[in-house]
Image (tube, rainbow, N blue to C red):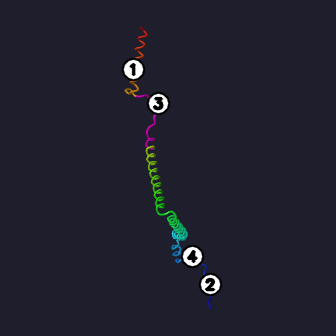
Amino acid sequence: LKTSIAAPLPIACVSAPLPVQRETAAMITTRRVIIFVMSLCAVPVTNSLWNEILRGKMMVEALIEREGLGAFLAKCGIAVGLMFAMWLGSQEQEKTASSLAEFSKLPKKEGPVAAPKGQKGQKAEEPAAVEGAATEEKKDK
């Protein structure tokens, strides 16, 4: 009987992945791992969210039983009015900000500016100058 000893394979042949390994590696992508982790985290988050919703519902039902439907609706109306007032205030704030931006784009005038001739302020000074000249003439005589 002859025994055969297999020749050692080169390192490149040993380290090359098998076709089966390539397929399984392609199946597990980073995207799939992220989706899996997010779905694991979603379960406790949705449970706590539903618990908060149900707790709020029970509180509203208890409030309606204690104070009545009219008081509950009045509180809701006040809350809606406050929200409308806040919205209206933000709209006014946006208008003010836009007009301020337009005003800041205008060229700035530095220092006092002389009034142009022909305005009321100039006409009021001219008669005084004429009277002053007339009084000087009287003093000279």
Q: Which residue is mark 4?
A: 13
Q: Residues within 10 Å of mark 4 (few under 14, many from 20)?
A: few
Q: Residues within 10 Å of mark 1 (few under 14, many from 20)?
A: few
Residue sitting at the far top: 141
**Mark 4 or mark 3: whose residue is earlier in sequence:** 4
**Mark 2 or mark 4: whose residue is earlier in sequence:** 2
Q: Nearer the viewer, mark 1 or mark 2?
A: 1
Q: Which residue is mark 1?
A: 127
The reply, left or right, for residue 37 in relation to residue 133 is right
Highlighted range, magenta:
101-115
Residue 30 appears in view: no
Circle on res. 5: 2
Quarter of the image with the C terminus is top left
Q: Which residue is mark 3?
A: 112
Give the residue drawn at x 44%, y 41%. Answer: 103
**Mark 3 or mark 1: whose residue is earlier in sequence:** 3
Q: Nearer the viewer, mark 3 or mark 2?
A: 3
Which of the two residues, 31 or 91, is positioned nearer the viewer here?
Answer: 91
